Image (spheres, helix red, strand yellow):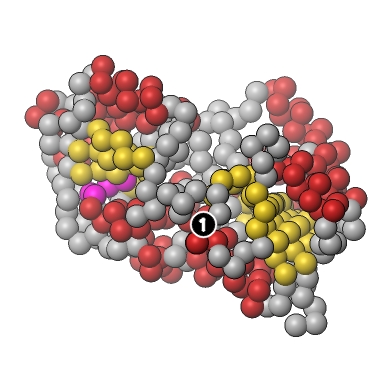
Amino acid sequence: MSNGKNIAVICNYELKQDRIGGMDRFYKAYNEELLQKGHKPTWIFSGGERFDFYLGFDLYLAGQQESVEDFALNFLKENESFNIIVTHFLALCTSFYKELKSNNQPYIIAVDHNPRPLHGFPLKKRIKNKLKGRLYSQYIDCFVGVSQYTADCLLQDYGSNLRRKTEVVYNGIDTSAYLKRTEENRGKFIVASHLRESKGIQDLIEAVRFLPEAIRNMIQIDVFGEGPLEKDLKKLVAVYELQHQFSFKGSSPELPELFRNYSYMLQPTYMECFSLSILESLAANVPVITTPVGGNPEIISHGKNGYIFQAGNIEGLRELLQKVMNKEITISQDVNGLIEKEYSLDQMVANHIKLLPCT
């Protein structure tokens, strides 16, 4: 293909063999599509390990003592020129983008996956973001929000003047990888989340603690994921003697096959952009109990494919769990159709390809 471009994709994302998730599948499908169209993609990740899933990638990993931004800048200075640079999971509107632009003037696409605090940034941070927008937004040719919420936050954070070069490309998943739930699996719940305070799993533990004993003893919650709050969460479970209710499973590449074993996914999060876990759960025909933060209301309709309670409302979550267990509320219809129709991995890849200036 005569108009094939050299494309660098820079991701603040660690590769882990025991955590092959939705973004890993996107990276793979996107790489294959770029190659098919005659482009030459080069991938730079913040760390992790190489493994078979990433065979066929021209792939480089930053060292433990070096940020992915510094590694990328050094790499790009020493290697061939790139026509297009795409970033994922990086802080936006920083001097990094000015330095990227100075090397061969590439077309730069910045994809925003970054969640915002529940009650917004403090005043000092808001002022700083506006200043950064004035200084550095000019070096980014296209901003991408992974939900309408994210795109709106981009304009609020860095300036409404960015509207003309801001796009929305929803996350998508490979729906064929997810086995479908066909049984009720009453009382079995799954959490699939990074274990940090903003994910609200401590609220879930508190909510289960206050359930009536008879209902509490019927519940089993499997928590998949790792993170800095893991020890504290396990300690809280032990203090409340909820070891029968909570089981910490760590990371697992088998989640697409495991979702089907549960009645609901629980996501009591305080911060979200557009949750891949929600898409994955719904693709497996498992409804979701979550909060109205970020892009969650763009996919979850209360009473149709899940239930929504206010973030931090432990009593609200407890009440929902009790009603679900007592069958006072139920979702009997299939919930996977919307994901297959509107949030597929193929659509996500195609929409990211459309962002390239050479298509």
Residue with the most extreme top position: 239
336 relative position to 89: left or right: left
Q: Residue at x 83, y 39 (%)?
A: 95
Instruction: Judge left or right: residue 205 versus residue 161.
Output: left
Residue 33 vertical placement versus 324 (above, below): below
Q: Which residue is denoted by mark 1 in the rendering?
A: 51
Which residue in the rendered view is the most extreme toward the bottom? Answer: 1
For numbered disc 1, what is the local secondary structure?
A: loop
Label 1, residues with CA under 10 Å away: few <14, some 14-19, many ≥20: few
Q: Residue at x 49, y 48 (%)?
A: 16
Kind of residue sitting beneath label 1: Phe
Number of dots carrying numbers: 1
User: In terms of image quadrants, where is residue 80?
Assistant: bottom right
Left or right: residue 127 versus residue 29 is right
Q: Would you say residue 103 is visible in this rendering?
A: yes
* Viewer-proximal residue among 155 and 274: 274
What's the magenta region? 262-266
Residue 35 position, x and y percent, is 66, 74
User: What quarter of the picture does the C terminus occupy?
Assistant: bottom right
Position above or below: 208 against 146: above
Residue 299, image x, y percentages: 44, 53
Q: Position of residue 156 (x, y in %)?
A: 69, 39
Q: Nearer the viewer, residue 7 or 302?
A: 7
Q: Residue at x 42, y 55 (%)?
A: 279
Q: Is 309 covered by the magenta stretch?
A: no
Q: Which quadrant of the rendered structure holds the N terminus? A: bottom right
Identify the residue at image location x=46%, y=51%. Answer: 17
